[in-house]
Amino acid sequence: MYKDNQLLDNHGRPMTYLRLAVTDRCNLRCSYCMPAEGIVYMPERELLTWAEMSRVVRVMHGMGINKVRITGGEPFVRNGLMDFLTEISALEGLEICLTSNGVLIGDYIDQLKALGIRSVNLSLDALDRDRFKQITRRDDYEIVFQNLLRLVAEGFEVKINAVVMKGQNEQDILALAALTKDLPVSVRYIEEMPFNGSGLVEGTLFWNHERILNELKTVYPLLRPILMQGGETANRYEIPGHLGDVGIIAAFTRTFCGTCNRVRLTAKGQVKTCLYDDGVFDLKAYIRKGVTDEELRQVFLELYAKRPLDGFEAENNRKGVINESMTTIGG
C-alpha cells in the first residue's frame, strides 16, 4: 500500500532502503559465503542490465526509497559500475552506499568522492594476514587494510563488517574493537548465517549476539548502548575514549525484523522481501516482457502486501532448505 507516496508493507513498515546486488561474482572465496571451489556464476545475459537496474532504482525512488546499497558479490568486479553510479546519483535525495570486500575499491575512491558517495561497508573478518587468507582463501589482507585507511583518510563513513566464526576469527573480536580507538569507524560483528552454498545449517550458533557482547565486555565493561534508529540492524555501543563504535547484527537469531525497511533485489532479478526467503518474484523476466513503469510499481505493491512478518516466517515459507551462496543473494 501507499501512504503519502511511500511504499508500506502489510505490517505497516515503510520501505525506504533498496539493497541492489549488481553481480553474483566475487574475487574472494570466503568460507561463510561459498564453498572452496566457488559457485557456477551466471552468464552476463542472465543478470539485470545496468539500464534495467537504473529503471528499477528510479521507479522505486518514486515509491519512497531514499537509500540504495550497491552490493554483490563484489560490485567492482562488474564492468560499468561507475557509469551506473553516475546515472543514479542524479536522482535527487537518493543516498548511495556501497558494500565491498575492499580489494578493488582503491582505484575508484576519487570517482566515488566526486559523485558524493561517502558511505562504504567494508568486509574485513580478521586483522591478521594468515587468518584473512584462511577465511577468504586469498592473500589480499594488506590491500584491503590499506584501502580501509585510505577511505577513512578521505572522509568516508566506513563500517567494517566482520562475520564471527568459531575456531576461525574469535581473537579478532577484541582486535577489531581496538581499531575503533584511533579510527572513526563502526565495527559490526555479524552472526554467521547458513548462506554458504553448502546447504548445511547448524542447529545452534556458538557466537551469537549475546556471546559476542559478553566477549567485548571482558575488556570494555563500560560499553554504552546507542539508541537504535528505525530500520537499523545493528545494536551499537560506544566505547568511552574511542573515536569509533562497535555493533552486533543478530543476522541468524533475527532480533531486528520488526523494523525492517529493506527491499532486496538479486543480480539475476529476483525480488526478496526477506533475506531468508527463496525469492518471491522474477522481476527480470517481468521487465523483459515490456511492462510499463506503472506495472512495475503495481508489482511491488502486491509483493509487499503479503510480506512475512519476520525471517523465521520467511524461512518456513521456503520451498526447500537453504543451500544458496550469499554471493548470489546480495549479501
Image (cartoon, grey):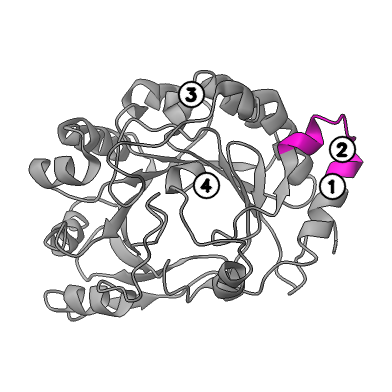
Q: Amino acid at mark 4?
A: Ile
Q: Which is nearer the N-term, disc 1 or disc 4?
A: 1
**Amino acid residing under circle 3:** Arg
Label 2 secondary element: helix
Q: CA distance from mark 4 to mark 2?
A: 24 Å
Label 4: which residue?
329
Q: Are marks 1 and 2 in contact (CB under 8 Å)?
A: yes
- Residue at 24 percent across and 51 percent down: it is 125
| 128 or 137, nearer to the observer | 137
Residue where numbered disc 3 is placed: 78
State the image quarter where residue 57 is shown. top right
Q: Position of residue 56 (x, y in %)?
A: 73, 38
**What whole-number distance in Å separates the C-alpha atoms at marks 2 and 3?**
26 Å
Q: Position of residue 188 (x, y in %)?
A: 33, 60
Measure the alpha-carbon separation of dots 3 and 4: 16 Å
Answer with left or right where residue 1 lies relative to residue 331: right
| Mark linked to residue 293 | 2
What secondary structure is marked by label 1? helix
**Residue 330: x, y in percent?**
51, 45
